[in-house]
Image: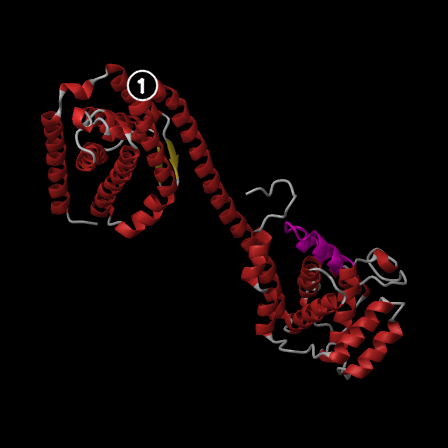
């Protein structure tokens, strides 16, 4: 933020600039600049109405009043344009109840840019009221000059506002351009093109063409504002979706991390099951969506253990009540995961991963293909990892012995076809990899999971962006 002496100096300079602009426009004023009166009235009303219809959007304000002022600069002259511009500044400042400092900023901005635009036009075309230049203002070159005036006035407007912000708030010019100028440039370019077309239409077809074009301007303003607001809402919705998805995945990660602190083998087991479950899903030809459900179910299938007491989690002896708690962990895990938007299939896979194909499992006693594919896959992968890599229930078995045990249970506990596919896969590939804590972090892939959760699902109501 600038020192007070610099701020006072800038204020004095701006007051002098407003006075000099008014004096300059007055000296340049000619009677022909105020004719035809109908054109003067039309552009004046359009400038004021355009300001009243202005729309606040990200990075600034979109208004048709600027187009009217540009037309006044190019079709009338600097004096009418300055009057319209200052009227808009006063109306805007009053309506928004600006402080005196912002009033001054508006006045100096709206008094300088009409003169800057008129200078561009004068050096490019000459005096639009001169008979000698009559042929020039009827050609396409005049439209190009009007377009240039529109862009220059926007640039002057932006520069003055950015300078004032840098003095008052210490806001950098580059940041101001990135946040306030660049996002609106497509709209400003389109407005400049429209101003050029309207000016050429007036010089060739007369006032009636310009009157008819007012409706075009208002429709253009409405459509452009609607588009920019739609993009702004889309950006806000995407940010909220990413934030919400991050919170949801963060909760799951926190629960799994907390469980891992109580029982470190949980994260190691989850990592190994998730990897082998995804590999088996790929082996079976599942699409990417199914692979992700199966992989996530493998990663979270034991999250229901979070509700266990330490006595159950690290047992020396289990009571009937303890076994009831253990048998309830699929429901508890499914309840936790099912509260997340888009995780219904994962919750189902967790709920039924202790079912048996012969109907003797829990919690629902499902039979065969009634059990979700993801649940059948997780059951095989979880059992294999427990037998070969964990010491929870005794010494780990060699892979070949674990394969024998899986085949013994095929058709009873496990899906026989899935067992044979899994066995063929592990005999061909190494699925062990890194199952440490870093392995768990890489498997959950936080940022990618958040991105997928935040993305809209095609065809699902409420996902439009």
Measuring from the top left, give residue 444's x and y in whole percent.
60, 65
Q: Nearer the viewer, residue 55 or 211?
A: 211
Q: Residue at x 51, y 44 (%)?
A: 237
- Taking the image as shown, residue 128 lies to the left or right of residue 234, namely left
Quadrant where the image shows the C terminus: top right
Secondary structure mainly formed by the magenta segment: helix
Location of residue 157 (image quadrant): top left
User: In the picture shown, does residue 20 fall above or below 279?
Assistant: above
Give the labeled residue for mark 1.
207
Asked whether residue 6 is in view, the answer is: yes
Q: Nearer the viewer, residue 330 or 170?
A: 170
Location of residue 200 (image quadrant): top left
User: In the picture shown, does residue 278 fall above or below 404?
Assistant: above
Q: Is residue 110 magenta?
A: no
Measuring from the top left, give residue 264's x and y in whole percent.
63, 73
**Callout 1 secondary element:** helix
- Taking the image as shown, residue 254 lies to the left or right of residue 364, namely left
Question: Dot 1: few (<14), some (14–19), or many (≥20) neighbours within 10 Å?
Answer: some
User: In the picture shown, does residue 145 fall above or below 52?
Assistant: below
Q: Residue at x 59, y 55 (%)?
A: 452
Asked whether residue 258 is in view, the answer is: no
Measuring from the top left, give residue 50's x and y in whole percent.
34, 26
Measuring from the top left, give residue 137's x and y in whole percent.
25, 29
Location of residue 52 (image quadrant): top left
Q: Is residue 342 magenta?
A: yes
- Taking the image as shown, residue 445 lies to the left or right of residue 56, namely right
Q: Nearer the viewer, residue 107 or 73?
A: 73
Which residue range is magenta in the image? Answer: 330-352
């Amino acid at each position: 933020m600038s020192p007070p002496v610099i701020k006072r100096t800038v204020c004095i300079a701006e007051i002098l600039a407003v006075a000099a602009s008014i004096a300059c426009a007055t000296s340049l004023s000619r009677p022909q600049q105020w004719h035809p009166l109908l054109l003067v009235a039309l552009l004046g009303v359009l400038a004021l109405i355009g300001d009243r219809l202005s729309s606040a959007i990200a990075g600034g304000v979109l208004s048709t009043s600027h187009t009217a002022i540009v037309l006044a600069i190019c079709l009338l002259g600097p004096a009418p344009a300055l009057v319209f511009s200052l009227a808009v500044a006063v109306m805007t400042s009053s309506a928004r109840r600006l402080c005196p400092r912002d009033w001054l900023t508006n006045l100096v901005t709206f008094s300088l840019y009409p003169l800057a635009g008129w200078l561009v036009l004068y050096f490019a075309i000459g005096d639009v009221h001169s008979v000698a230049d009559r042929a020039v203002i009827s050609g396409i070159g005049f439209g190009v000059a009007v377009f240039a005036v529109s862009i220059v006035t926007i640039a002057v407007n932006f520069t003055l506002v950015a300078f004032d912000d840098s003095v008052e708030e210490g806001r950098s010019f580059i940041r101001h351009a990135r946040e306030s100028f660049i996002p609106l440039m497509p709209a400003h370019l389109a407005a400049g093109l429209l101003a050029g077309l309207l000016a050429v239409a007036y010089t060739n077809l007369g006032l009636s063409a310009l009157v008819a074009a007012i409706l075009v301007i208002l429709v253009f303003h409405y459509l452009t504002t609607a588009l920019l607001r739609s993009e702004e809402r889309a950006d806000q919705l995407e940010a909220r979706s990413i934030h919400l998805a991050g919170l949801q995945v963060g909760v799951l990660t926190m629960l799994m991390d907390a469980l891992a602190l109580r029982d470190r083998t949980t994260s190691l087991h989850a990592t190994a099951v998730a990897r082998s479950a995804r590999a088996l899903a790929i082996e079976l030809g599942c699409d990417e969506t199914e692979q992700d459900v199966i992989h996530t179910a493998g990663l979270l299938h034991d999250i229901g253990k979070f509700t266990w007491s330490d006595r159950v989690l690290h047992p020396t002896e289990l009571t009937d009540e303890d076994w009831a708690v253990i048998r309830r962990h699929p429901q508890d895990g499914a309840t936790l995961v099912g509260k997340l938007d888009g995780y219904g299939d994962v919750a189902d896979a967790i709920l039924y991963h202790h079912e048996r194909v012969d109907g003797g499992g829990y919690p629902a006693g499902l039979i065969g293909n009634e059990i979700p594919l993801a649940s059948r896959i997780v059951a095989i992968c979880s059992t294999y990892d427990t037998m070969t890599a964990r010491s929870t229930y005794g010494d780990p078995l060699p892979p070949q012995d674990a394969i024998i045990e899986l085949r013994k249970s095929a058709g009873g506990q496990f899906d026989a076809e899935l067992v044979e596919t899994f066995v063929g896969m592990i005999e061909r590939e190494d699925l062990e990899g890194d199952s440490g804590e870093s392995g768990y972090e890489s498997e959950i892939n936080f940022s990618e999971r958040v991105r997928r959760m935040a993305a809209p699902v095609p065809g699902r109501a409420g996902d439009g962006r």
